[in-house]
Amino acid sequence: MTARRLDPALLLVAPAVLYLAVVYAVPLGLLLVKSVRMPDGFSLSSFVAFFADPFSWRVLGNTLRIALWTTLVCLLVGYPVAFALARAKGLPQTALLVALILPLSVGVVVKAFAWQILLRRDGLVSGTLVSLGIVDEPMRLLFTETGLVIGAVNVFLPFMVMPLYSVIRQIDPRLMEAAATLGAGPFHAFRRVLLPLTLPGAVAGIAFVFSLSIAMYVIPSLLIGDRFQTLATLTGRSFLFMRNERLGSTTAAVLLAVAIAVVMGSGWLARRMGAAR
Amino acid sequence: MVAFLDIGGAEKRFGAAAVLQGVDLSVAKGEFVSLLGPSGCGKTTLLRIVAGLLAPDRGTVVLDGADILRLPPHKRDVGVVFQNYALFPHLSVAENVAFGLRAHGRPAAETDATVAKFLDLVRMGEFARRPVQMLSGGQQQRVAVARALAVGPKLMLFDEPFSALDRKLRETMQIELRRLLRDLGTTAIFVTHDQDEALVMSDRIAIMNRGAIEQLAAPAEIYESPATAFALDFVGLSTRFEGKVVACAGGTAEIETAAGRLLGKGNYIPGARVTVGVRPERVRVGGALEPGENGVELPLRDAVYLGSKLLLHFDLPEPDRAVAEIGAAGFVLPAAGTRATLRWHFDDTLVFPEAPAP
C-alpha cells in the first residue's frame, strides 16, 4: 500500500454508489445488452427495424410532444408559484409548502383515477368550463392528450416548483429594488436580473419534469389508454403483454437516449444563455 | 433656502407601530444631509419612501418641483446605495455599472464611456471585467456607488453603506464619497447610526428618534446646542443630571439634582422635571468656583488616556453621569475615588424638558 489516502468524500458516497450499481446500473446494462444481442451475436438490427417502422416515429412523437407540453405548462404554472413560495412568510408559506409536498404522498395511481373522474364528459372540469362559458357543451377530456397533460402537470408540478423555489429563495429581494432605482422597469428588471438568476432552477426543473414525463407509464395508461402509445407504455407492453423483450429493450434504450440528450442539452443551453447575457 | 427635495408630513405605520409620525424634511440642491438615529427610529423607512420602495400612509414627497409620490421607483431619478450593496451577482463590475444606463436606453458608446468614467472616479477602473463576487467589501461598495451615480440621478440615497466595513476603511470611504459627491454637485441623503460618520460627512444632520426628527442642523450646532436630551445623548459625550426645577426667574432656572443645585437658562414652572447637560470639553476640573459657573463635587471613577487628552469619568448613580475632557499634558491624575470639583460656565449649561414618555 502506498501512503496515498482515500478521499473521505468517496466513503460518504460509497453506500449510494453501491446501491445504485446493484439495483440500477447492472439491470439497466443487462437491458441495454438485450437490445443489441441477437441469437447470432451482437447487432443493431433491432434499432434499424424500430426506426424503419412509421409507428415507432409516431410513438416517439407522442412521447416528446406530451413531455414538452407537460414541461412547458409546469414551467409557466410553477414559476409564479415558486415566487409566491419564496416571498411568502410564516403560515402562508407553510400552507403553500404543504399544499405542494403533501400530494406527493398520494400515489400516482390514486391521482390518475381521480383525474379519470374529473376529466369525464360529466366531470368537474367539463362542468366548470361550461358554466364559465368557455365551452358551449360538455366535453370529454379523458382519453385525450389535453387530459393527459393536465393529469401529468398535476403530478409533476412539485418537481418544477422545488428547484425554482430553492434558487429564488437565495435571491436577495434588494436586487429588484436596486434594479428599479437604477431606472429599470419591471419587465427590464425581470429579464436582466431575475430571469438569469433563476435560470439554473428553471433548467433543473425542466430536466426533472421532462425526464419524468417522457418516462411516465401509469398516468398515460389510465388517462389516455392503449390507443395512444409512448415509449414508456410501449416498453411496458412489450415486456408485460407482448413478451417481446427485444422491442422492449430497444424502446427502453431509445427512451434513455432521449432523456439523456434532453437533460444534457438543457444544461448546455443554460450555460450558453448564461454566457450570452 | 429653496428646497430641492421636500418631504412633508410623512407618516407610516406597520401594524400597531408608528414608524414615522409626521416627518418634514427639506434638502437644498447639492446638500448632504444625514439621517442619524438608533435602529428602529424610522430613518431607513423614510429613505425607502423617498426612493419609492415604500408608500407612506400620509405625506408628500416633492423632488425638483415635481410631486414624485405616485411615481414608481424606476421613474423617480433617485439613486440608492444599499447597506448590503445589492450588486447583481451574475454581472461583472462594468456590467453592474452599465445596468442603469442600458435600462435608460443610452447608446452603447456613451454607456461604455460613462462606465469607464465612473469606475475611474471610484478607482475601480482596473477591476472592470471582474465578477463582483470576487471583490472585497470596500470594492463592492465603490462599485455600488459608481452604479448608482452613473445614471446621473437627481438625488442619491445611502442606507448605512459603510456599516459592514472596518473602521479604517470606513473613514477613508467617508472622505472619498464626500469629495466625490461635492465634485459632482450631487444632492444626497445619508442614513447612519454612526454619529462620527454623520459629523464628518454632513452639511446638516437630522437627529431622528421614534419616528420623528428631533433636530435638523449643521454638525457644530447639533453638538453645541442640542435641541433635546436625546440629541445631547446621541451625539458626542456629555455630562447629564436629571433634576427638578425649584425656582425660575428672569429666564434662569434653579434646578435641584443629585449632585447639587445648578443654574440653567430657560423658563420652567417650578416642579418641572428637566435634564441638565454639559459637553465634556466645557468642564474644568479643580480650582475654585468662579462667578457665573455651575459646580459639583464628585469622586473620580476612572480616567481614559486618549493621547492628546484625558477623559475623566466621575461616579454618579444612573442615569446621571459626569465626564470631563482635559488636556493630557502636565495634568497630575488624582487617584480613583478622589473627590474633585467640576465647574463649567452657566452659558454652557444645557437644559431640556423631560422627554415625553414613549
Image: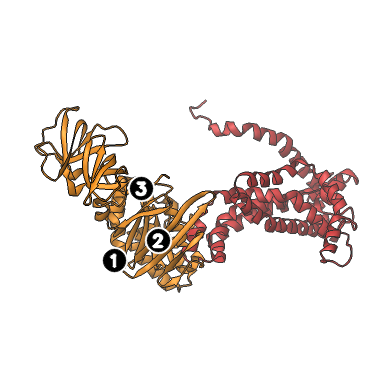
Chain colours: A red, B orange
Q: Is residue B273 above or below residue A121?
A: above
Residue for badge 3? B165
Q: Which residue is mark 2?
A: B24
Say what amino acid the circle numbered 1 marks. Asp
Label 1 lies in what chain? Answer: B
Circle 2: element type: strand
Q: CA distance from mark 1 to mark 3?
A: 24 Å
Give amino acid for label 2.
Answer: Asp
Residue type indicated by callout 3: Leu
Looking at marks 1 and 2 on the same chain, the residue that comes earlier in the sequence is marked by 2
Relative side of A171 to B310, left or right: right
Where is residue A115? Give x, y as percent: 84, 51
Count of marks, rendered view: 3
Q: CA distance from mark 1 to mark 2?
A: 28 Å
Q: Nearer the viewer, residue A102 or B252?
A: B252
Residue beneath the point at 40% across and 61% down: B24
Do the residues indicated by labels 2 and 3 lie within the same chain of the protein?
Answer: yes
Tell me whether circle 1 and circle 3 mark residues in contact (CB < 8 Å).
Answer: no
Q: Residues within 10 Å of mark 1 (few under 14, many from 20)?
A: few
